[in-house]
Each structure stands twice: as C-alpha cells, then as structure tokens.
Image (cartoon, rainbow, N blue to C red):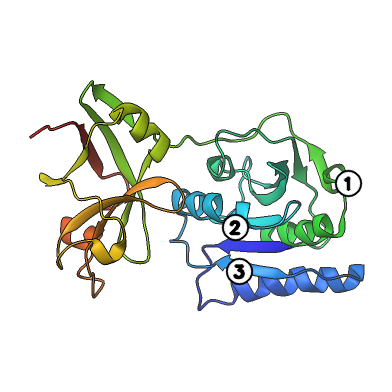
Amino acid sequence: MITLTTDFGPKDPDGAALRGTVWREMIQLGFSVPVVDITHAVPPRNLLDAAYIVRLSYPHYPKNSVHVVLVDSAPSADVFPIAYRADGHFFVGMNHGGMALIRPDVLPESLVRLHAPEGSRHPSETVALAAARLARGHQLADLGTPLAHWNTLSLPEPRVLNEGAAECIVQFIDHYGNAVTNATRSWVESLAAGRPVHAMVRGRKVSRWPESLRDAGKPGDLFLRYNRGGYLEIGLAEPDTKANTAASLMGLQANTPISLLFGNAR
C-alpha cells in the first residue's frame, strides 16, 4: 500500500500528477497496490503539521506500506529526496529535517539518498518512482546511496515547572478547532500521580474532563480530553462554525503555551 501526504492543496494539479506518476510506474512494473491520499491539505511548508498527521496515521496501515510525505519539497544543495525504513514501514520524502519529526523516538533501520531517474524534472517524480518500486519489493539499496546522517528537526518538549505545574504548547489545530498539545497522556498522568489536572488557557482555567463529547458541557464550555493519538487537547462544547471553536475563541495556534496545574490549585 502507498499513502500520499502533501502540501500541494486540493485544487492544484500537483497531487494528481504525483498519483499519476505512481500509477504509471506500477503499470510499467506490472503490479498494483492501493494508493491512499492521507491529505493534500497540509498548510504550505508546515512540517510540524505534516509530521503529526503522518505520525497518527501510518500505524493503521499494513506493515511494509510506503508513505510518501512531500511538504516543503523544493530542493537545495542539502535538501534532496530520501527513503528509509522505520517501525516496519517505508517513508519517502525530502531531507529537510521534517521526516525526522514523524517518529523522533525511532531511528531509521536503513536510509538512502535516492537516485534521480534520467530525465526527472522534480524531486516529486523521484519520490513517486521510488515509492512504486518499494511497494513492488525493491530494496532501498537498489534505489539510492546509503546515508550515514540526515537533516533533523526537533519536536518541542513539554516541561515541568515545579511539583504542581508544567507547561506544554499547542502543536496542531484539528478540523474541529480543537487545540492538540504536545503533552502525551502518559507524561501528564505520570506527573499528576492521581491528582486532578487543570489547564490555564489564555488566563482561563479549564478543569472539565467529560466522559464523552455528549457530556462536554453547555455551548461555549472548554474541556480537556486525550485524543485518539494519546495527546492532551482542549476542545469547545458544541462548536458550530469555524469562528466558534476552542482555537478561534481563545486565539490558540501552534506554539501557544498552555500551563498545566496538578491538584486543587487555584
């Protein structure tokens, strides 16, 4: 299986061209596998959003799936197409550091700089051809030159302030306007040690942990929960428009700091 994640947008032809190149190569190789669009709506050049989306998506696909990630794909002297294997999957994209954000806790088992096919006009074509060949069963060593090092970027980490407080940041705003933080459930619960957990959002204390979204409170109430990816997020009860969400009403965006309080803090 091959997945596609890009910042090409739903309107421009680049996403269709990428898919077409993958299919053309599969036909030439005499096989086919499903090609799934995870999204082409990553905000332009937003490597953090792309990494979050792929991080939460790829584990749901079969092992040995090939995940194409083309975000901020303009080449330069040290930014070129790469492919690697990690956690039983293949990932193909650009060496700008963003690929390392997908699983910063897992090092590549093998990593190559992809050879550009003769006549290739853009890195996306190199990436598409490599994806098809990996899905066909070709080895990474057949597609490029081994790399000992790659460009990396670091995910911001939540931090402990004192025994009763910590700080995290917003890392992603989802489709419903929920603000997803970089604090994981395991990290928060280890610090809380059974104490109540509250969040300070732009000076507003949020303490409600609903059992389900149906119990999130009256319209306009903020609440806390862990999303399906295991991250702490801040939501709004019964959001009805893009102008009426947790992110829009509280002015939350990527890197907005969120304070966490443990216990019966005021």
Q: Amino acid at mark 1?
A: Asp
**Real-space Cα separation, disc 2 to disc 3, in angstroms:** 12 Å
Residue pictured at 23% horizontal, 75% vertical:
240
Local packing at callout 1 (Cα closer than 10 Å; few below 14, some 14-19, many 20+) is: few
Q: Position of residue 137 (x, y in %)?
A: 87, 54
- Which residue was labeled with disc 3? 37
3D distance between C-alphas at marks 3 and 1: 26 Å
- Residue 84, above or below 67: above
Q: Which marked residue is nearer to the observer: mark 3 or mark 1?
A: 3
C-beta proximity under 8 Å, tags 1 and 2: no
Position of the C terminus by quadrant: top left
The residue sitting at 51% across, 75% down in the picture is: 10
The x and y percentages for residue 131 are: 76, 58
Q: Which is nearer the N-term, disc 3 or disc 1? A: 3
Q: In front: 141, or 170? A: 170
Instruction: Mark 3: give few (<14), some (14-19) or many (20+) Cα within 10 Å.
Output: some
Position of residue 36 measured from the top left corner of the image (x, y, whole percent):
65, 69
Looking at the rendered structure, the kind of residue marked 2 is: Leu
In the rendered structure, find residue 132 and report the number of the disc placed on it.
Answer: none
Residue 142 tag number: 1
Classify the position of the N terminus by image quarter.
bottom right
Query: Mark 3 is on which residue type?
Result: Asp
Label 1: state its secondary structure.
helix
Q: Which residue is mark 2?
A: 70
Q: Residue 194's quadrant in the figure? A: top left
Residue placed furthest toward the left: 266
> Looking at the image, how many numbered discs can be counted on the residues?
3
Element type where label 2 sits in the image: strand
